[in-house]
Image (tube, rainbow, N blue to C red):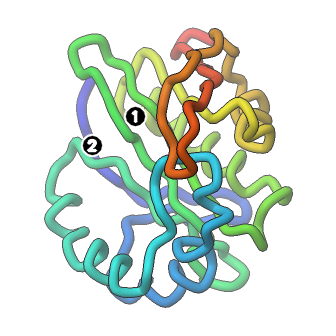
Amino acid sequence: MEHKGTKRLETERLILRPFRLEDTESCVRNWAADPEVYRYISQEAQTAKDVYDWLSTADEAYASLETYYWAIVEKSSGEVIGEIFVDDFGSRNRWCELDWKTGRAFWGQGYATEAAAAVIQYLFCQVGFHRIQAKCCVENSASERVMQKVGMTKEGILRGYFYTKDGRWRDIAMYAMLSSD
């Protein structure tokens, strides 16, 4: 396995690239400030200042070849419509966990699936991961469909896996795929 960092990837409708400070307004407008985008996760919606502060440190994060964090840019509009990133990885065992968010206006159009498929191919073929996993709250059927569409296999339910901002313990569906799949 050879870490290569966040390289620009392109699909039919998307450009996946490192975030830039000038993405702040697009991120806030399209997804980062929308509480509905964060409905099934423990994070909170972001303010414009939160996004600006986060993006102002992005170059530091991208200096590491172990950072895999893409802005999902719709080619037709040039807008940042979401994010996709490796949230965790175990280098010794060559596995990683993939996570994504897209704005509500872009749900149901296959963008998350298209982005995930491109990143999975990059992580397996270019970086050399052996296993890629993803998980979602069991109520998040749209995210679960993305995992299924990219070829991941459901491995089970992690009961009471995390505590959400609404004061509930949530069960999580775990999916994964191997480079040999």
Measuring from the top left, give residue 59's x and y in whole percent: 20, 69
Instruction: Count neighbours of disc 1 (C-alpha within 10 A) and say few if under 14, some if 14 to 19, many if 20 or more.
Output: few
Quadrant position of the N terminus in the picture = top left
Measuring from the top left, give residue 134's x and y in whole percent: 55, 30
Q: Quadrant of residue 54?
A: bottom left
Q: Residue at x 30, y 75 (%)?
A: 55
Which residue is the site of mark 2? 4
* Sequence-first disc among 1 and 2: 2
Q: Amino acid at mark 2?
A: Lys
Total labels: the figure holds 2
Q: Name the side, left or right, on which 84 lies relative to 138.
A: left
Q: Residue at x 59, y 20 (%)?
A: 174
Q: Name the side, left or right, on which 6 lies relative to 75.
A: left
Which residue is the site of mark 1? 126
Residue 34 is labelled as: none
Note whether 177 is above or below 120 in the view shown: above
Quadrant position of the C terminus in the picture = top right
Q: Residue at x 67, y 68 (%)?
A: 103
Nearer the observer, 104 or 170:
170
Measuring from the top left, give residue 2's x and y in whole percent: 24, 30
The answer to whether marks 1 and 2 mark residues whose Cβ atoms lie closer than 8 Å is: yes
Nearer the observer, 5 or 29:
29
